[in-house]
Image (tube, rainbow, N blue to C red):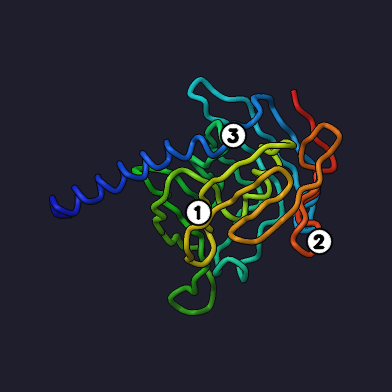
Amino acid sequence: MSIRRRALCGLLAAALVALGAAEDALLPEAPAVVIELHGQWHGERFWARLGAADAGGRRRLELVYTPPPPSAVGGAQLVDCPFLILDHRLRILQWDGRDSLQGAVYREGAYRITREIERLTDDGKDRTPDAEARRIAMPLGWDERLAPLLLALIWQSGSQGDVGIADFFGPPGPLSRARWQDREVWIAGRRHEIEPDGAGRLARLRDAAARPLLLVAQRSER
């Protein structure tokens, strides 16, 4: 890499870091308690546990769910039990696909994404996993497909938020936003509505046609 290109990359990274700091005011902090959710997501059961913050303020999110099929994410194979490292606003610092090749890490103003793709072997008789790398330059933010779950963890009645999102593992596409104003939600321009529970937390997330996208059947906080 030339000196000029290094300098330009450094300036871009610094600009994205500054932009990320400015966006802090747009996104509330997640509750400091340990949160565990059971429910349905796209009609399939899921479980999620958001741990307490470590000394550096990072939080671990464990998830068991039915991920999108490869046909919906450009051929990528997504693991059904990843864990993620998040900041205090649930922005993604790292995505660990456990024993798979799938993963993501935020470094120098960009997400370094690894997609697991199945390819034919040289003899054409079998398929084998292969790693496909991509880089998404953006401030710290959310994965577009994970946004409903992160919303279920951070939302409370009367709150508002705005965060940058990208489809980490799907087909390449433009950056977008996840925004909410109380019960009204927009994810990548698609409108949704929240139904709260008795404690003012997210109980259901419905799409614009009132179809349930995510249902929280049980929530514990401690």
Residue at the spot 62% in from the left edge and 32% down from the top edge: 30
On-image quarter of the N terminus: bottom left
SS category of the residue bearing label 1? loop
Residue at the far left: name it. 3
Marks 3 and 1, the one that precedes in the sequence: 3
Side (left or right) of 122 relative to 90: left
Which percent across, then down, holds residue 25?
A: 51, 35
Q: CA distance from mark 2 to mark 3?
A: 27 Å
Q: Residues within 10 Å of mark 2 (few under 14, many from 20)?
A: few
Give the camera-side residue of 162 and 114. Answer: 162
SS category of the residue bearing label 2? loop
Residue at the far bottom: name it. 124
SS category of the residue bearing label 3? loop
Which amino acid, by three-letter code, is at mark 1?
A: Leu
Dot 3 corresponds to which residue?
A: 28
Vertical arrangement, residue 54 with respect to residue 26, above or below: above
Dot 2 corresponds to which residue?
A: 211
On-image quarter of the C terminus: top right
Q: CA distance from mark 2 to mark 1?
A: 33 Å
Number of marks in picture: 3
Side (left or right) of 183 relative to 73: right
Dot 1 corresponds to which residue?
A: 101
Q: Say which of marks 2 and 3 sits in front.
A: 3
Q: Residues within 10 Å of mark 3 (few under 14, many from 20)?
A: some
